[in-house]
Image (cartoon, rainbow, N blue to C red):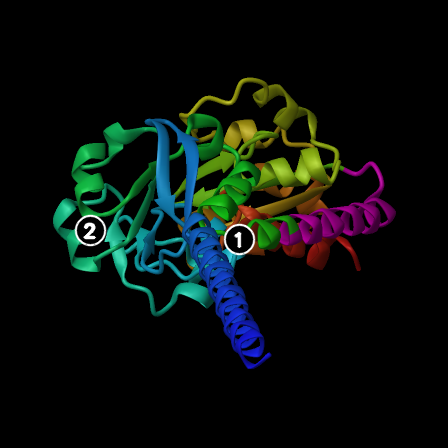
Amino acid sequence: MRICRYFLTIGLLALILLLAACGGENEDSGSESADNSDEQNIEVTLDSQQGEVTLPTDAEAIMAPYHEDALVALGVTPVAKWAIGESIQDYLEEDLKDVPKIEWNMPLEQVLNHSPDLIILEHGLDSYEGTYEDYKKIAPTYVMKEEVTNDWRKQIEVFGKILGKEDKAEQVMNQYNEKVKSAKEEINNAIGNETVAAIWATGNQFFLFEENRHSAEVLYSELGVQAPELVQSLSGDVEAQWNPISLEKLSELKADHVFLLASEGEQGIETLENSSVWQSTPAAENDQVYVLNDPSNWTNKGLIAAEKTIDDLLEFLVK
């Protein structure tokens, strides 16, 4: 009997050890699975102008020259901001005032000095000092396809995937769409079918926004505001080159409201104020020319640029 009990005890001990070992293996397997899952989450593979590319989603020092709007919209501060000499995208300065500048053509030495761990470039690589291979040696580099470069909505989506912020990208787009819907109703109730135009004055030159030029797309396409005939005649296939319009031609602008975008002290403002031709246009006669001293959100495309443009429109058109 004692022998039987002895072997029974040994058998139970062996069974307990076996079960413990199996449990340990399952825990190790679970840990390994979790580790693999974490590894999968820190990389993303996307199609790009250069073909399929794998990028880290946990990058912190990010560089996306001229497209900082999309980064800021997603809650990311870039390691450097686009500039042409002293010129920057002023409308982003509330978020980027402490961020150092990098020249628009991305000099390799400047890029190296900022030590990025992710670089995002436009499809037109010829505008940069370095080549794709040059930048890729510095950090993982993503080159946007042309349709992504030209469409800020697609940028929000793509940047969201690159940065592991897809939920945030969806959230900010939903909020933007709600803003457009609300603003469209307010503006329509305020001005109905009255026409609106936007002019950028720089130096003593005047640039009339066509319907799809920069943030005018928000004004006409998204908010459904009526464009005056002169604007309609200039629209169509908007070419990359944006040519100034003469003061004589501006006299044909039969707009009910005009947004005049000009930095403070710009010569063009004085020119229009002293022009009897301009003063006889409907908007000027009815005191419905609105001067905005920061034109930067109007001359850019991006979610934040669009939101600020909508805010400008609401401020002056909805009273």
Residue lying furthest left: 109
Whether residue 162 is situated above or below residue 241 in the rendered picture: below
Q: Position of residue 297 (x, y in %)?
A: 51, 50
User: Mark 2 highlights which residue?
Assistant: 111
Please indicate, yes or no, whether residue 88 appears anywhere in the rendered image. Answer: yes
Task: Give the farthest residue toward the right.
Answer: 189
**What span is in magenta?**
171-194
Residue at horizontal 55 percent and vertical 42 percent from the top = 157
Q: Main secondary structure of the magenta part?
A: helix
Q: Secondary structure at mark 2?
A: helix
Quarter of the picture holding the N terminus: bottom right
User: x, y (%) of residue 295?
Assistant: 49, 51
Magenta span includes 227: no
Query: Foreground: 7 or 288?
Result: 7
Number of labels in the image equals: 2
Give the residue at x 54% y 27%. 249
The location of residue 186, given as percent across then percent down, is 82, 51
Q: Amino acid type of disc 2?
A: Val
Residue 287 visible in image: no
User: Is 36 above or below relative to 142?
Assistant: below
The residue singled out by tag 1 in the image is 165
Pick the front one: 117 or 26:
26
